[in-house]
Image (cartoon, grey):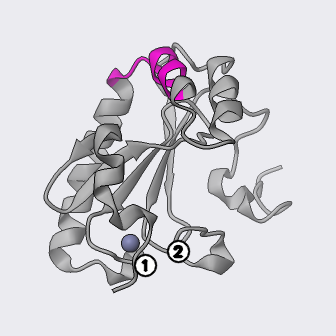
Amino acid sequence: MEKCAFCDINKFRKRIIYENEIFYSIFDVHPVSPGHALVIPKRHVVSLLDLNETEWSFLQTTIRETIRVIEKTNFEDLYKTMKQKKVTSKSLWFCDKMLKHSGLHKKPDAYNIGNNDGEAAGRTVNHLHIQIIPRHKGDVEDPIGGIRHIIPGMGNYKN
Ligand SMILES: [Zn+2]
């Protein structure tokens, strides 16, 4: 079995914000918005398509419960604490960005929920991790198209 960062759940034990028998969730240490979280299967699974039926059924609850935690979290405390821990060399920069974010003290208005399913899709860690990215009204100039913007210039099909 391939060994990888997300297989070593003990390394993340103190950072787990939600857990059941199949999945665990943590806050991303390189967040793109306040509350950005990852949902990770405990079993080493590479693709979403490798999940079995039981794992798929747990995924619904896991996403919902992770969002409940996000909506109860004080992001200022979260990123001040994360900053002190210096999880990675780049996490400081991301934490500073979050501490200045207009959504720091607000409940998210919406979410982008997604997965880079394969290296060509932008994946860097080959263990499934579903990204839950909170969004706020006005956080980008024109959000129309959302995740369609992964291909530059192809996001907005309305204007
Ligand atoms: Zn793994």
Q: Residue at x 19, y 65 (%)?
A: 57
Quick check: 124 above or below 30? Answer: below
- Mark on residue 47? 1
Determine the image quadrant of residue 128: bottom left
Q: Is label 2 within 8 A of ligand 1 (CB to nearest ligand atom)?
A: no
Q: Residue at x 83, y 61 (%)?
A: 152
Q: Residue at x 49, y 27 (%)?
A: 108
Say if the magenta span includes residue 124.
Answer: no
Nearer the observer, 6 or 85: 85
Magenta region, residue range: 72-82
Quick check: 136 above or below 158? Answer: above
Q: Residue 120, position in %: x, y?
A: 67, 79
Nearer the observer, 144 or 6: 6
* Res 51 seen here: yes
Label 2 CA crowd tier, 10 Å (few <14, some 14–19, many 20+): some
Q: Residue 46, position in %: x, y?
A: 42, 78
Question: In the picture provided, is 83 more to the left or to the right than 93?
Answer: left
Instruction: Name the residue that disc number 2 marks.
Output: 117
Q: Does the CB distance between marks 2 and 1 fall below 8 Å? A: yes
Q: CA distance from mark 2 to mark 1?
A: 6 Å
Q: Residue 29, position in %: x, y?
A: 54, 41
Magenta span: predominant SS is helix
**Kind of residue sitting beneath label 2:** Asp
Q: Is label 1 within 8 A of ligand 1 (CB to nearest ligand atom)?
A: no
Say if the magenta span includes residue 79.
Answer: yes
**Kind of residue sitting beneath label 1:** Ser
